[in-house]
Image (spheres, rainbow, N blue to C red):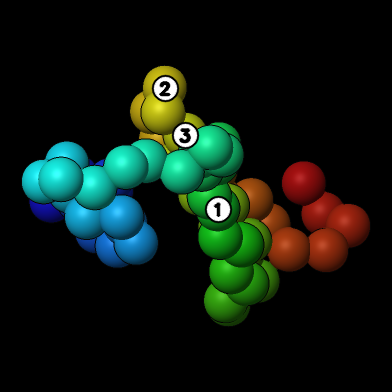
Amino acid sequence: MDTVDRIALPYGSGVGGTPPDRRLVAVGTITRHDGRTTTVRATEAGVTGSIRPTGGTR
């Protein structure tokens, strides 16, 4: 499933709705689990992410 398909748009999905003056530029999450930090960011251009050790060790 594409990330954009999971975002609920308040103006509908192009059926008679008018898009807002502003739009979503990026959405992201940061999670920390078992000594790892996972970062995911989604934009119109695509999705990027990384997994790194949590804390000072890299």
- The 10 Å Cα crowd at callout 1, few under 14, some 14 to 19, many 20 or more, is few
Q: Name the residue: 56% across, 39% down.
A: 22
Of all residues shown, which one is farthest toward the top? Answer: 45
Disc on the earlier residue, 3 or 1: 1
Image position of 24 with respect to 36: above or below: above
Q: Are marks 2 and 3 in contact (CB under 8 Å)?
A: yes
- Relative to 53, 34 lies left or right: left
Q: Number of callouts in the render?
A: 3
Disc on the earlier residue, 1 or 2: 1
Name the residue beneath numbered marker 2: 45
Give the Cα separation between the discs numbered 1 and 2. 14 Å
The amino acid at mark 2 is Ala
In front of the other: 11 or 6: 11
Residue 31 seen by the camera = yes
Disc 2 is placed on an element classified as loop
Q: Name the residue: 58% across, 77% down.
A: 34
Name the residue beneath numbered marker 3: 43
Q: Quadrant of residue 29?
A: bottom right
Give the Cα separation between the discs numbered 2 and 3. 5 Å
Mark number displayed over residue 28 = 1
